[in-house]
Amino acid sequence: MKGLLAVFDGAGYTLGVLVRALGFMARKPRLRMTAQIAYDFGLKSLPVVSIVALFSGMIICLQTGIEMSRFGQEELLGDLVAQVFAREFGPLITCIILVGTVVSAYAAEIGTMKVSEETDALEVMSIDPVSYLVAPRVLALCVMTFLLALCADIIGILGGALVANQQLGVPFRIFFDRALESLEGREWFGLPRDLYAGLVKAGLVGLVIAGVGCAQGLRATGGALGVGTAVRRAVITSIVLILILSYIMSWLFWRALQED
């Protein structure tokens, strides 16, 4: 019972921090600090995201292509890889990578400031730690998750095309024609709906996991050991939320597509 109450208490605290951060982002966005954080944490994660996306696309294409070749359906690999990355896999691997590279760093940085009483010093100077520390980090990760997911989609599809051509004999032209055809004709706000759904999902999940990392940092106590605990909780909570939110949003977008 005590553990369940602790979970609800942590969820409520995180939600409160995230709502306050969104309010500060709307009223007084710290764009210069946000841009610096986006570069330091988000842009520097691009090489890792690119490598993982490339080999993920290659693995998916190889494993599914082997089975599809038994039925003479290799030409459909472009459809499959494009749909998988646009709808789910690109945003999913991007968010999971950013949990390890960015969310953990958020929790460690803010947690260190908390246990060393730097956040208390900010409050003494009438500076809200949520406004100064949390809001720029949440905005930066939300934007960078969106952009990195788009890069992951493109690179993953390119990786699939390489394997389809070199290992399974599918010409590049056929692969990319099928990939583009599978995404065309269904648009929301100028983007293919499948791509749009994945990118929106990535941005929203990035918003949530950034809030989790910052909130865990603000709750850190007990010196270095407490900071380590905050980082561990931030990573575990973020990964679980990524999977839950990904399923919920995938279901919602699927329902929207069905209604259209």
Image (cartoon, helix red, strand yellow):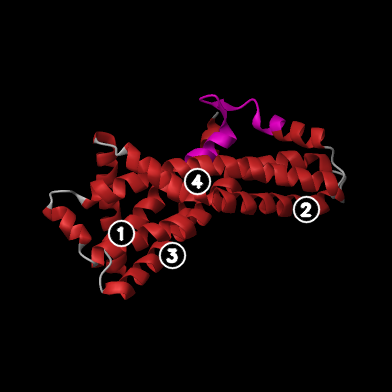
Q: Which amino acid, by three-letter code, is at mark 3? A: Ile
Q: Considering the numbered disc 3 on the image, is that residue within a helix, a strand or a loop?
A: helix
| CA–CA distance in space, label 2 to label 3 | 31 Å
Dot 2 or dot 4: first in sequence order is 4
Find the distance from the CA under tag 3 to the CA under tag 1: 17 Å
| Distance between mark 3 and mark 4 Cα atoms | 23 Å
Callout 3–callout 4 Cβ contact below 8 Å = no
Task: Give the Cα separation between the discs numbered 1 and 2.
Answer: 42 Å
Sequence-wise, the earlier of marks 2 and 3 is: 2
Give the residue type at disc 1: Ile
Q: Position of residue 14 (x, y in %)?
A: 30, 55
Q: In whole angstroms, how far apart are the C-alphas of marks 4 and 1?
A: 20 Å
Residue 138 drawn at (x, y percent): 36, 47
How would you classify the magenta stretch by its main secondary structure?
Answer: helix
* 103 is higher (above) or lower (below) than 251: below
Mark 2 crowd level (few <14, some 14–19, many ≥20, 10 Å Cα): some
> Which residues, given as a range, are shown in magenta?
180-202
**Who comes first in sequence, dot 4 or dot 1?**
4
The residue pinned by badge 3 equals 236
Disc 4 designates what residue? 43
Residue 93, horizontal then vertical, whole percent = 56, 52
Select label 3 or label 4 by which is in front.
4
Residue at screen point 32% across, 65% down: 7
Quadrant location of the N terminus in the rendered image = bottom left
Relative to 3, say whether 79 is above or below: above
Q: Earlier in the sequence, mark 1 or mark 2?
A: 2
Which residue is label 1 attached to? Answer: 110
Magenta includes 41? no
